[in-house]
Amino acid sequence: MSEILTREGLREMVDDWLAAGKSVIGPVEVKPGVVLFTPVASAGALRLEGWVRPANSIKEAFFPKHETLYGYRITGNGIELTDPPEAVPEQIVIGAHPCDAAAGPKLDKVFNWDYRDEAYNRRRAATTVVTVACASHDEQCFCTSVGLGPADECGSDAMLFEQPGGWVVRALTEKGQRLFGGAGFSLPALPTPVQAQFDPARIAAFAKEQFDSPFWREHALACLGCGACAYTCPVCHCFDIVDEGNAREGIRARNWDACQFPIFTLHASGHNPRGSQAERQRQRVYHKFVVYPEKFGEILCTGCGNCARACPAGLGILPVVTEISHAEPIQA
Amino acid sequence: MSGNGDFEPRIVAYVCNWCTYLGADLAGTARLEYPPNVRIIRLPCTGRIDTNLVVKAFEIGADAVLVSGCHPGDCHYTAGNYHARRRWMLFRELLEVLGFDMRRLHFTWISAAEGKRFQQVVSEITEKTRELGPYRPYEAAPAPVEPLTPLPAAARREFPEAEAALRETARKLLAEGTVKVVIGHGANGPVFITRPEDAGRLTWNEHSLANLTAYLKRREVRALGKAAVVVKGCDERALVILEQESQLQRGDVHTIGMACAGMGQPKCDACDTHVPRFADEIVGAGEAAPAEAASGRYAAVEELLQKSPEERLAFWTAEFDRCLKCYACRQVCPMCFCERCLADKNRPQAIDTSPHRQGNFAWHISRAMHLAGRCVGCDECTRACPVGIDLRLLNLALARAAEKQFGYRAGMDPAVEPVVGSYALADKEEFIR
């Protein structure tokens, strides 16, 4: 393999993967201005060159928005269970950014902590993540504030660096080597990354010490209570289990769920422990910067900025932590 | 038709308790034979047949659906069938735009005395459906992504005079105590100004897209006290509906109407309400564009209707397959004010919560139908959608139906009776047998 993999060369490789029966997921401009990680039928559909931040995340590859866990059928004497119908094909995610790739190791922890989640693990094991190092960023990006960076290798199996003539490829894991061979190259220089904008430790301290601060109420006034932030987040992982079917047969499935929905914590009694949007907004920050770090030793945020881009009301992690950074501590 | 030899159509019939069900009963007691393909579901009145039930029937594999009730004038509840008829008129246009096969959906009036007619109708529908073959709308292949023309960069729109006047208006309202909070647009999104000295945070530019009337019903916002809300002409139409539906009284809220020059959105092209009509005060009249001709209001949906039903279904399949069920479309909508949405109720589960194809179709059909004759066309749902679903087209389809069939436009005239919830004896029923 030559030092530089041409643009056409990479696309030919992608078509070869597809021809070999692998599933390929990458950035596709599904309509003007809307780029999403989407399974593709040919390499031509991929938006690989130039910096582009898809509105969704690659978590869908391991943790789909809707997944059948098993089927059930009521027989004369009991219940017969069947395995989920879909086989998991070998899949390659291409065009992820380091903020997407880093989601894998974070999600691995939560899906293997007290219970090994088979549905998640089999998809994760079948997935190779090919990341494109970021040569640019936008005003919502903040990976450097949460300990990542434009060429961070966490969670990537291979990394592509865009060059004038094509790509420099760096295989990082065995999975990556299987796709690109084992060649190692000198790393090209990257443009200056986005400047770190806040200190996560300060956010964690604020969330703990100012738990009852009116800050949350004021901040959450604009929050409409939708799940756009959680559903475009690479690491939000809450789900709901539902049974769908009729009196004879059906499926048990899991669907994404989000802590911003009022019914997320609603008890059957009618009591809601997080009864206001302020409490739900606080929860989102608290989980990412306090709960998860205390349990797993790292922040549950990769700085991709998708939440702020998706929010119809201009909220999101960067806007809220920026406000927190400026907020005056309130004496208890 | 050859090839359908073994095919036995499954037909779901939603019938009213008082007329068609008794008609079917009469057919039975009179020993009139009709095909056993029809599954009859008895409901109190056609007025109580939720259009979602029709969708449900297709979801679980119905090849055709029959909805039948009392002849006009015969309703046991006086007017249930008239209300139903009006809803069906709108619902049919929605399904048409979605690309459903309209040959699969039948409406009839059959009285308790018409056992023979019930026999005929059911036999005809069964034969027709047998010819059409099985119906699997949810197995349609999604339309492939089309080659795209890049969007032109959004033009900066700054209205410094209007912005300054808006800030001054807000400052005064707060300083004089007329209101406790001003809901307006800020640098990153909606802002809630409670102190006169913060009025400078208000902005007015091409990002001032949010329809802020959606906040008026929210508990946390109401707790702040009497509000002033910044509205564009399109947003203001939502206030008309909210008042018609007894959700607020105009005296409870102070409206700051922004004369709007258009925000460069698709809706702005055919806008004829650039200047709010009922606001307590108008700001920035000097910078507003003149009202445009109303033609072209439904151009986008009419373009979609040029495609074949199969192409339309493929288009919507691709759109809805992207849906994540984040409900941003619902949350951002001023008209979606229900304390608990039908989609969040699970006893029974009217709409599958799963973001799979059926679940997404059911959700978007329900959402659109619940906004029929109510959507004011602010397009916030479309702006809010993180995956770019063209929800605007569904709303336009129903707005077009309401204007075409009833001459009605939501939120334009507070004195006109809402299109859903009222009826006219003269409502067209050429689609009902």
Image: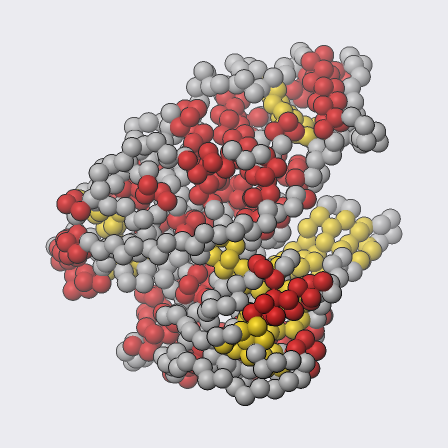
Q: Please indicate whether residue B56 sits to the left or right of residue A327 in the image.
A: right
Work out whether residue B111 can be spotted: yes
Vertically, is A43 above or below B55?
A: below
Location of the C terminus of chain B by quadrant is top right
- Nearest the viewer among A212 and B31 is B31
The residue most toward the bottom is A186
Location of the N terminus of chain B by quadrant is top right
Q: Please indicate whether residue B324 sits to the left or right of residue B57 in the image.
A: left
Work out whether residue B223 can be spotted: no
Q: Please indicate whether residue A72 sits to the left or right of residue B379 in the image.
A: right
Name the spot of residue A298 as percent of width and height, x first: 52, 82
Name the spot of residue A11 as percent of width and height, x first: 61, 66
Name the spot of residue B186 as percent of width and height, x first: 27, 60
- Nearest the viewer among B210 and A163 is A163
Vertically, is B409 above or below B81?
A: below
Q: Please indicate whether residue B185 sits to the left or right of residue B167 in the image.
A: right
Which image quarter: residue B237? top left
Q: Residue at x 43, y 49 (%)?
A: B382
Vertically, is A300 above or below A90?
A: below
Q: Residue at x 72, y 28 (%)?
A: B132
Q: Residue at x 54, y 35 (%)?
A: B307
